[in-house]
Amino acid sequence: MSAQTSPQADPDWATRGAAWWSHVQYLADDKLQGRLPGTPGFELATQYVVDHFKAIGLKPAGAPSSYLQPVLFHSLRLNAQKSSVTLESAGTTTSFALNKDIILSPHVMPGPAVDAPLIFIGYGLRLPAKHMDDYAGLDLHGKVVVLYNGAPARLQGPLRAYSRMPGQRWKALKAAGAIGMIAITPPRPLPGPPPAADPKAPKTPERPATPAPVRPTIVIADPSLDTLTGLRFSASMAPASADKILVPSGHTLAELQPLIDAGKPLPPFDMKTTLHATTAVDANPDIDTHNVVGLLEGSDPKLKKEYIVISAHLDHLGVGKPVNGDTIYNGAMDNASGVAAVIETAKLLASGPRPKRSILFIALTGEEMGELGSAYFAARPTVPKPQVVADLNMDMFLPLFPLRYLEVQGLGESTLGNDARAIGQLNDIEVQFEKQPEENRFIRSDQVNFVAQNIPALAFKFGWTPDSPEMKTFNDWVKTRYHQPSDDLEQPIDKEAAAQFISYLSQLATRVADAPTRPTWYPESSFAHQ
């Protein structure tokens, strides 16, 4: 049995942890300026990964004879001065204040102003496998739909959020003839314990539902990969503004709220309103960027033609709004830590007996821009797409405390879950389902684009038990460091636990690579019926 398929006797976790941390130190250093794609800092990060892939002995697997897979992004910015939204109902015209009453997306098809009737369609879901169809009996042709951007209580698991992703939702709306959509988007609570029963006790803080955009919208330049092609109008609004659009129909959000709170279906209705809207978009310079791809070729003459992906995103937020005088969003845990794990896992697997299947190690671009680098690779892989059998993705796996529990996102969706449990048992690690399912983390990082291509995937976070010190540490990190300049090199990290996770990951990858059959979706998984 290879060193990667069973725990090693007394590994030097301190030395391994220091090696992992050395990559984090470089990638999250101030000189890389937050690794925003298209900047010199991102190029330094890219070259660092290339150099390590080369030193490990991975084969170039980006473009021919290169570790780099080029990806081009368009950068779009709303021109608020030339944009407008008004509603006309019964001879009365109502104007909407942009970035206050309503948030416009610049990711729409260029064209003339939109003049279209509005129709409310409840949650806007069409899921035959779940016997849900909010479109039944409705004529959506040429209309802009208004929907409540939630989901009924009976829709659980990752599909609850996956079905509401803009690309998934627009696919169904476009097929039904709609030309645009307005989402009434409720705020979601920050991770943490539920609000106390005491009405005088402070409530869990909420994230704003529709913050004013501070960055341009970035999209993949290749039009064939645009999941919103044909969309002529796209907007969102907070519940506080909802009645401004609902009242002409004779309905209010307060009327719908009991149904929402009870998780019941919402009735569709004609809004008796015509939308007049102009979305003016300015194009910023394109962004030339790339994924970094290295190949460890498998040992089996047949199985080496199948590929397991081990991935993490290389980018972060760059330089932004100062917080306590710090403007550099270093992204140490998000996600220099994941790329460091990719490098160290490659080193570990390359140093022992070769797995039977081949393994692609990828540092992805553009995750913080909307999982764009993974969307490009998953749709345009540098190996035959049908031969990509699994993705194991790291995105801020958060080694903040000892590795006793491991949250495995996607655990109940495919046979990869059985593999994850088996390797956990070998290493005395208790594998857990998502600890905070309301956060929808399985569909909020790069693995979702492999799932969209029907490729089973897993993602990981250090786990904890309820009301434990580890739970508090985890939630405090999310509240105070996530997407903040304080996600830097000056934070307490359990480096030995990170090394133990990398050992777990290498054993998991080997088990999947050596299995006689490729991973498959469980029959009951929603993703098995895409």
Image: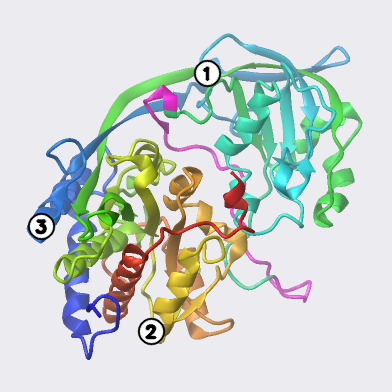
**Residue occupied by mark 3:** 57
Q: Residue furthest left?
A: 55
How many other residues sit within 10 Å of disc 1, few (<14), some (14-19) or many (≥20)?
Answer: some
Report the residue at 17% width, 60% height from top.
26
Please state, as top left, top right, bottom left or bottom right, where the N terminus lies in the image.
bottom left
Mark found first going from the N terminus, 3 or 1: 3
Q: Secondary structure at mark 3?
A: loop
Report the residue at 46% width, 64% height from top.
416
**Residue occupied by mark 2:** 426
Quadrant of residue 397 within the rendered picture: bottom left
Residues in magenta, as a range: 195-224
The dominant secondary structure in magenta is: loop
Mark found first going from the N terminus, 3 or 2: 3
Asked if residue 282 can be seen in this view, the reply is: yes
How many other residues sit within 10 Å of disc 3, few (<14), some (14-19) or many (≥20)?
Answer: some
Position of 139 relative to 326 (above/below): above
